Image (cartoon, rainbow, N blue to C red):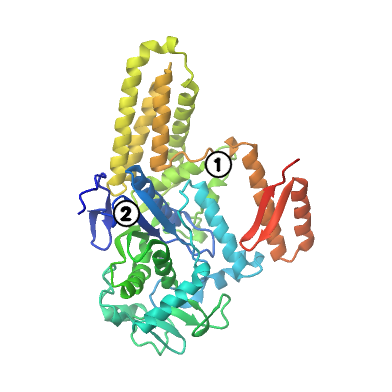
Amino acid sequence: MTGTTDYPPFRLFNTLSRSVEVVQTLEPGVLRFYSCGPTVYSYAHIGNFRTFLTADLIVRAARAIGWSVQYVTNITDVGHLTDDDVADGGGEDRMAKALSSREGERFGNVWDLARYYADQLVADWKTLNLLEPTLRPRATEHMRQQILTIRRLIDSGHAYETELGIYFSVPSFADYGKLSGNEDAGQLAEAVRDVVTDPGKRDPRDFALWKKDDKHLMQWFSPWGWGFPGWHIECSVMAVEYLGEQIDIHGGGEDLIFPHHECEIAQAESQSGKRFARYWVHTRFLQVEGRKMAKRDGTFLTVRDLVGRKEDGGRGFDPAAVRLALMSGQYRKPANFTFETLRASARHIQRIREARKVAAGAVGAVVGETSGRDNSSDATSGRLDAVYNRALASLLDDLNTPEAIAAGLEGVKVILASADGMSAREADAALVWLDRMEALIGWEGPPPSLATGGEDDFAATVERLLSERTTARSKRDFARADAIRDELVDMGVEVMDAPGGPMWRKKLTV
Ligand SMILES: [Zn+2]
């Protein structure tokens, strides 16, 4: 204990200790946080986004108490295997499978597919008003670091080579199983029994760090020939690269506890000899209308499905309503996403937007007309302060979002109740409160697209045309691609083709 920390306590459930703990960061006032991102072989579904929302709220709560946050979340843009949810990682490559599916037909190759879905992920991320991370590293851009780490694991006796790949030696790391409780060797062997295994593996629990495969759609050259890395090595390598050998919080969906996070711990701690992450935070699965999400019964929902959905007179749902519905249950409880909750959330958002409109409209209220209300303005701001403190305390209490939202809605009620003849001072207090609540739980977000101005529409049109042009080019439809380029030139847009995809700017008119 340094004795210098007088931050309010931030409590989170730690999967490692199976209890709610007060987060003590390694460096007082600085939070080092890594949250696992998605594999981009398709659109992320709202269950994935509930997990990203947990990360978002951890960052917001930490900032609200004055911590500075280093927040890293990755994009897995190298195909990991359909059976990677068992530690052995056999089965079919997810990206290759997506490329050969009907939706995959429009992509020229697996790299285009990964880039497209990574871009869509970031777009949906913004739609849901999720904070931009400090860094969003991609697996394919960290191949050298992964290869070097694997080599160090071999050199230190924690990994070995077979004819088919490189494996981490589980018996070489005594703490394996401490996160998931999966410590029984017999049980683990049972769990991986059905997967195609490598006869050269020394222990059935050993997991792949590198697969030798010169036929794979994404392959890199390594000291062991052509191949590609295992999924688990990517995250621990990028976390250590950007946050150091020891981080404060590591998060993800509950399905990542085993094997992914268990394997990350083994890889990182066997190298550093230090505890990798102090707190492990996992978000429970989301059901839709009481069922596991499945494409065939219409319960597999993406952000764009909901925002683009033709509801309420032809308009989709307000993205803020989708976010609020996803926040309406605490992250650690199984959640059921229903359209009833979504509609109720949409009504709440309408009231929040109405409160902002009322307050913004009253900012210039003439003092003489409302001077009789000065006492009530102090009362209003006092009540709003109390409501904010309750919302913050709820978030700091293991991200109790239902309580935080309930407190917030009470504040909205206070504002709307004083709407009639609101004084300028009351309006100021209301706007300050709305901004503080927005920073804390991000419930308003940017105004819905209909309310946005001309500049945003222009940018959206350019982005749409660029994406159509990329698609046309990947299908080798150059005539269409050139036609789109001409259209962009007519709009006064200059396009530069960069390695990471096309960039554009509006030409300056002299
Ligand atoms: Zn990960």
| Real-space CA distance between mark 2 and mark 1, rounded to the nearest whole angstrom | 30 Å
Point out the image quarter for the C terminus.
Answer: top right
Q: Amino acid at mark 2?
A: Arg
The percent position of residue 150, horizontal first and vertical second, equals 42, 78
The percent position of residue 135, horizontal first and vertical second, equals 47, 57
Mark 2 Cα shell of 10 Å, populated few (<14), some (14-19), many (≥20)? some
Against 378, residue 306 (above or below) is: below
Secondary structure type for disc 1? loop
Secondary structure type for disc 2? loop
Is residue 197 in sight in this rendering? Answer: yes
Q: Look at 72% across and 63% down and name the residue there.
A: 473
User: Which circle marks residue 332 in the picture?
Assistant: 2
Mark 2 residue's CB less than 8 Å from ligand 1: no
Residue 294 falls left or right of residue 102: left
Image marks 2 and 1: residues in contact by CB distance under 8 Å: no
Query: How many numbered tags mark residues here?
Result: 2
The percent position of residue 360, horizontal first and vertical second, equals 48, 25
The percent position of residue 148, horizontal first and vertical second, equals 44, 77
The quadrant where residue 260 appears: bottom left
Mark 1 Cα shell of 10 Å, populated few (<14), some (14-19), many (≥20)? few
Q: Report which residue position mark 1 lands on.
A: 311
Point out the image quarter for the N terminus.
Answer: bottom left
Residue 217 falls left or right of residue 337: right
Q: Look at 67% across and 49% down and name the residue there.
A: 505
Is residue 329 in sight in this rendering? Answer: no
Mark 1 residue's CB less than 8 Å from ligand 1: no
Mark whose residue sits in front, 2 or 1: 2
Q: Amino acid at mark 1?
A: Glu
The quadrant where residue 184 appears: bottom left
**Nearer-the-camera pick, 313 or 353:** 353
